[in-house]
Image (cartoon, helix red, strand yellow):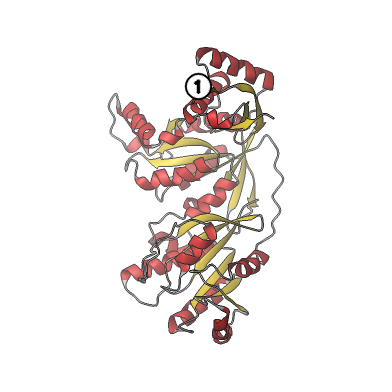
């Protein structure tokens, strides 16, 4: 089931970034007493009462027509559109301003649940400041203090009440669900259209668990697939067309529901920092990954062009060493036939389960080659290993002392497991546990 999304919005300098940092438990957003410091949407995961959700910090919505302010306002509007619940933040010490009223007008049009947070109410003696904020029309205002962390529990209680309750569609084990992510204009839409256009056997268009996404089911060579919509597949209005910032939240929604994620790169433009950030979301989510280098037809080639580009990908995506790389062109359909077989392979590896006896034989052979290390006179002893989960494959190694399991030895075990059982395209998780 997808995580609900909370967007924190308000005019500049009401404490949105401070509240964001409080809720996620880290100092992620820049906090500075200068309007306009937070220029882009910033995303993180938060938890309240065992409920995980995504939270967005936005730049302040301002009524100015200056170019930068206009871009910030557009970013905030995207965040509003993508959210399930909006926390509207105002400054209790300053009262209602004209800018607050302008923000309120935008929120009325969104038809989203709005929870009104009155920030900078640092003690209970300031409660009288709340009453005028009823005039904004969002019901009960919640007094909070980002600086001191007061009142956030009541605010979150109210926000969680408005989270959508959506049933996850039934999943059959054989269907592979995959999404395409990447920055704008790398060819995601063309690639999707090429896949579906060649197939001509679309089963159905099913509304996804997110409000606007459309999941497309199709069949190829007796295998069933679902392509999960992302922001790149359908631009929605001028906001998406006029902002270069990738709609990260839609990618996160698609990633959550995918078995396999295709990270699409532009062969013409090469690799930029944003590509690495986008791919990192799929890696952190533990999804199977294929790196797709699109627009390969537009690249001037020599004998070593593909090898050199692959080396660059490996150097810049070192954390994706397990992900296969495929070069193709959605426009000319060159090498497009190689894509789905790779999706099938990595999808099956993502769901692969290894028998415990075979796994321990591989570990024993590995230890014969590379004995366990000793730390401060203590030697690591591996008692046995078992696989406890799939998607991604997750292994627990029972040892005498988990503190003795150095990350380099953990990496050695991962490499031996990959050599023995494949697992191309999927991350592997290994945990050391003490056997009592």
Residue 328 visible at all:
no
Q: Dot 1 surroundings within 10 Å: few (below 14), some, or many (20 or more)?
A: some
Query: Residue at point 38% right, 48% down?
Result: 274
The image quadrant where one finds the C terminus is top right
**How many numbered tags mark residues here?**
1
Look at the picture and state if 343 lies above or below 243. above
Between 128 and 276, which is closer to the camera in this rendering?
128
Quarter holding residue 398: top right
User: Residue at the front extreme?
Assistant: 377
Residue 15 visible at all:
yes
Between 235 and 409, which is closer to the camera in this rendering?
409
Left or right: 17 in relation to 135? left
Q: Position of residue 387 (x, y in %)?
A: 65, 28
Look at the picture and state if 383 lies above or below 107. above
Query: Residue at point 52% right, 54% down?
Result: 250
Left or right: 346 in relation to 169? left
Look at the picture and state if 143 lies above or below 262. below
Q: Which residue is mark 1?
A: 373
Between 141 and 400, which is closer to the camera in this rendering?
400
Q: Position of residue 306 (x, y in %)?
A: 34, 28
Quarter holding residue 433: top right
Q: Position of residue 206 (x, y in %)?
A: 65, 51
Q: Secondary structure at mark 1?
A: loop
Between 271 and 214, which is closer to the camera in this rendering?
271
Quarter holding residue 395: top right
């Amino acid at each position: 089931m997808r995580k609900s999304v909370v967007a924190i919005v308000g005019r500049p300098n009401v404490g949105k970034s401070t509240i964001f940092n409080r809720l996620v438990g880290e100092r992620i957003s820049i906090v500075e007493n200068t309007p306009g410091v937070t220029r882009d949407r910033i995303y993180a995961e938060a938890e309240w009462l065992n409920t995980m959700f995504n939270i967005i910090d936005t730049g302040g919505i301002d009524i100015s027509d200056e170019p930068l302010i206009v871009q910030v306002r557009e970013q905030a509007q995207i965040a509003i559109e993508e959210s399930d619940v909006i926390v509207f933040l105002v400054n209790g010490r300053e009262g209602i301003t004209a800018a607050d009223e302008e923000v309120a007008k935008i929120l009325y049009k969104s038809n989203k649940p709005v929870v009104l947070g009155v920030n900078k109410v640092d003690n209970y003696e300031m409660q009288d400041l709340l009453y005028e904020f009823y005039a904004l029309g969002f019901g009960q205002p919640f007094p909070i203090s980002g600086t001191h962390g007061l009142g956030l529990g009541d605010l979150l209680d109210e926000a969680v009440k408005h989270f959508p309750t959506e049933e996850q569609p039934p999943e059959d084990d054989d269907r592979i669900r995959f999404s395409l992510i990447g920055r704008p204009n790398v060819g995601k839409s063309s690639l999707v259209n090429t896949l579906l256009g060649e197939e001509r056997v679309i089963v159905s268009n099913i509304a996804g668990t997110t409000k606007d996404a459309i999941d497309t089911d199709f069949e190829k060579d007796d295998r069933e697939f679902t392509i999960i919509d992302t922001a790149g597949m359908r631009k929605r209005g001028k906001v998406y067309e006029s902002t270069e910032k990738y709609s990260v939240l839609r990618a996160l929604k698609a990633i959550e529901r995918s078995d396999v994620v295709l990270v699409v790169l532009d062969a013409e433009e090469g690799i930029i920092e944003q590509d690495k950030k986008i791919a990192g979301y799929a890696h952190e989510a533990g999804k199977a990954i294929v790196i797709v280098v699109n627009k390969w037809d537009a690249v001037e080639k020599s004998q070593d062009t593909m090898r050199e580009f692959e080396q660059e990908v490996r150097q810049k995506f070192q954390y994706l060493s397990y992900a296969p790389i495929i070069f193709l062109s959605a426009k000319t359909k060159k090498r497009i036939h190689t894509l789905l077989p790779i999706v099938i392979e990595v999808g099956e590896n993502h769901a692969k389960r290894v028998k415990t006896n075979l796994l321990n034989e591989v570990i024993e052979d590995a230890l014969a080659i590379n004995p366990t290390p000793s730390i401060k006179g203590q030697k690591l002893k591996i008692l046995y290993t078992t696989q406890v989960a799939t998607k991604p494959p997750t292994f627990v190694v029972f040892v005498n002392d988990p503190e003795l399991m150095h990350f380099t030895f953990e990496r050695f075990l991962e490499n031996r497991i990959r050599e023995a059982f494949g697992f191309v395209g999927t991350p592997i998780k290994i945990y050391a546990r003490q056997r009592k």
